[in-house]
Image (cartoon, rainbow, N blue to C red):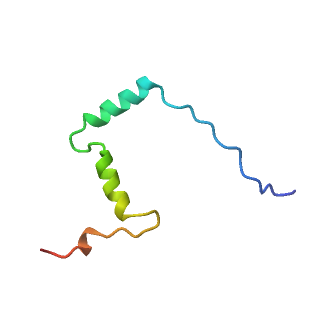
């Protein structure tokens, strides 16, 4: 029997409707302990880290 080496067919996903997206966003905003990131926060982290970079541990920081 010959082994199939081709890639599997891509999965098809349905996009969220506007109502579903709004419901998820409102649920995220209602959690005071885990607020969604702002665009500024994403820009700040993108500036310092790229995919594959090793992120520092909290214990690596020097005590001030």
Query: Where residue 6 sits in the image (x, y, percent)?
Result: 77, 53
Report the residue at 30% width, 69% height from top. 57
Q: Is residue 16 left or right of residue 22?
A: right
Quadrant where the N terminus sits is: bottom right
Which residue occupies the foreground of this view, 43 or 8?
A: 43
Q: In this view, does 18 lie above or below 9?
A: above
The quadrant where residue 27 appears: top left
The quadrant where residue 9 appears: top right
Disc count in the image? 0
Query: Where residue 20 sits in the image (x, y, percent)?
Result: 42, 27
Query: Where residue 8 sits in the image (x, y, percent)?
Result: 71, 48
Q: Is residue 22 above or below residue 36?
A: above
Q: Which residue lies furthest to the top in this view?
A: 19
Q: In this view, does 18 lie above or below 63?
A: above
Q: Is residue 15 left or right of residue 40?
A: right
Report the residue at 27% width, 35% height from top. 29
Report the residue at 29% width, 49% height from top. 40
Q: Which residue lies furthest to the right in this view?
A: 1
Which residue occupies the foreground of this view, 50 or 21?
A: 50
């Amino acid at each position: 029997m010959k082994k199939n080496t081709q890639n599997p067919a891509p999965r098809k996903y349905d996009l969220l409707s506007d109502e579903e997206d709004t419901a998820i966003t409102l649920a995220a905003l209602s959690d005071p302990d885990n607020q969604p990131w702002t665009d500024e926060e994403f820009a700040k982290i993108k500036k310092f880290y790229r995919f594959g970079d090793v992120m520092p541990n909290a214990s690596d920081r020097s005590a001030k």
